[in-house]
Image (spheres, rainbow, N blue to C red):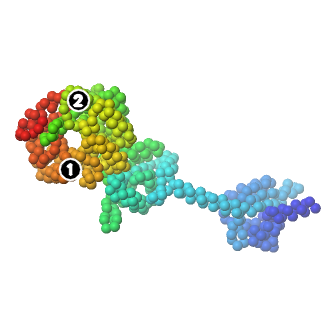
Amino acid sequence: MKESFIRYALDNAAIVVMTDAHGTITFANKKFCEISGYSKEELIGSNHRILRSGVHHKEFFHLMYQRIKAGHIWHGEICNRRKNGSLYWVDTTIVPHVAGTDKIDGYVAIRFDITKRKELEEELQINIRCLEETANTDFLTDLPNRRRFSQHLADTISRSAKKSGTFHLAILDIDLFKEINDSFGHEMGDYLLKVIASRLRAIVDDHVFIARLGGDEFGIVLDRENSFDNRKLCEKILDSVRNPITIGSITHYFSASMGCAVFPQHGTDAASLLQATDIALYRAKTLGRDRFEVFNNENMEAVKKKSQLLSDVSVGLRREEFVFFYQPVFYPASNPAISFEALARWDHPQRGIIGPTDFHIALTDPATCAIFGLYMLEHVFDDMVIMRDKGICFGRVAINLTNADFRSDAFLERFFNRCAQTAIDPEQFCVEVTETMLLGDDQKRVERGLRQLHGVGVEVALDDFGTGYASLTHLREFPIDRLKIDRRFVSNIEMLSEDYVIVRGVIDIAHGLGKTVTAEGIETAQQAKILLDMHCDSLQGWLFSKACALEDLYPAIRKIPEVLNTLGSGLIL
């Protein structure tokens, strides 16, 4: 009674089949018939192989038969094929039947249908793969993103190391992308990225992997053994960027710069390769952009030199080795007639007094530049107090600012605090900014800071006018009081009619907008006379005085009248 009930319960709960030692079916229960689609008459006498799905390899069944032939129970999951051709999965336990002679004369297989579970697992795997793909794909360009790039680079390094192979790593950067965004808007910038990504995608093959790393930066792995082929691919990639892009009725032309490094010559891990690639990219940009450069040891020496210079400048700031020289700015039609520009000098312990050309590279580091700006502020205020105490009469003192001075409110707060502490009026200051400061990501912060200074009477001068990317609209939109004509135009004003026309045009435009003009780099009396005839408001250059230390300032000022005598009468000092 109990045994028959157990068989009844098992028959209703499980799929049961019995075979002889050769796999011929000798018994099949109702559930087995239902799930397989075969009748009992079709199953009995047939070999169990009629259920094979083709999903499993031969090795799978070989190991299974090896175990059950040895008299051991086997348990696992098997995919079978129904009579209609569809597949189903079963959790299977196969029990060998051992005869009295220790010989196996048959097998009993007890199975449970797990098809729904397997379908859910497959669906889950598909969802995981979709999520993985989403997590590894850049949303804007549909290229692999930085995460996927890092994985691919690590895999390529590992594979190349094992087979002693080589490959090129490259970083591509769209030239002047910030200016493109600022000039045409972020929508245009996004469209440009999509177009370039589409062109790069067309180059991708089994040996070329391209990803967007962020912003306008693309990472490229060139996995061809032949170095010449990789370099040809670099040129092909740059050519794809150079192709014109038509938007509406206007055709635009763009370019990109690339830096390349080679595994394992330039690095054996991702960090060292990326560092070498960044250095090469920086080199490509400094050489004029629209090109690719391969890393070399000279590049590394330049980086080491900059790193050492950063360290030396940091030490110099702590030791207060930096001092400020002052160059007079002469106003022929105003009183007082003299203002000054504060110019940094390094009183180097070994090299003596050196100018900014020997340490300006260190000031391209934003953090160092911000520290330097605060240092300059403190010392110029101190020097102005000394000038006041010595009775030196002057109009304004100009200081040169950078984007780093507007990274936080520290510079402005310190400026206003020092004005209060020293009783020096903000109207005794001029801040000089360059055209590139009016562009890029920092533009809003720079504009806000300049408006704060301008609002309390600080004069704002646009330095090196005509040599950067600023347009005339910036003269209207920003609080600019004065333009400084770059010395490159002034130096040839006597000989080149083009420079003469440019300088005259700048003065006329500035005056028409209610702004004043300073010409810098004046070295001859003839240059000064031409500029005075053009009604240039103020003059600066070696003709009047070089920049000099604070203690030499008063004697330098006293010599200026001698120079003025050569320019004619009627000039105020």
Task: Work out whether residue 500 or residue 129 is closer to the camera in this orientation and state it.
Answer: 500
Of label 2 and label 1, which has the lower sequence position?
2
- What residue is pinned by disc 2? 388
For numbered disc 2, what is the local secondary structure? helix
Where is the N terminus found, in terms of image quarters?
A: bottom right
Disc 2 to disc 1, how far (Cα)? 30 Å
In the rendered image of this protein, does residue 240 appear above or below residue 310? Answer: below
Quarter-wise, where is residue 394 in the image? top left
Tell me the amino acid under the disc marked 1. Gly
x, y (%) of residue 383? 26, 30
Which three-letter amino acid code belongs to the residue tagged 2?
A: Arg
Quarter of the image with the C terminus is top left
Q: Which numbered disc covers residue 205? A: none
- Identify the residue shown where x is 29% and y is 32%: 423
- x and y percentages locating residue 375 in the rendered image: 33, 33
| Relative horizontal placement of residue 345, taking residue 20 as reference (left or right) | left
Mark 1 nearby-residue class (10 Å; few <14, some 14–19, many ≥20): few
**The label number, if any, that marks residue 514 in the structure image:** 1
- Placement of 227 over or under 552, stated as above or below: below
What's the residue at 38%, 57% (across, down)? 186
In this rendering, position of residue 471 left or right of residue 519: right
* Rendering coords of residue 260 (x, y %): 38, 49
Q: At numbered mark 1, what does the secondary structure look like: helix, strand or loop?
A: loop
On the question of residue 207 being in view, the answer is no
Residue 61's place in the image compared with 416, above or below, is: below
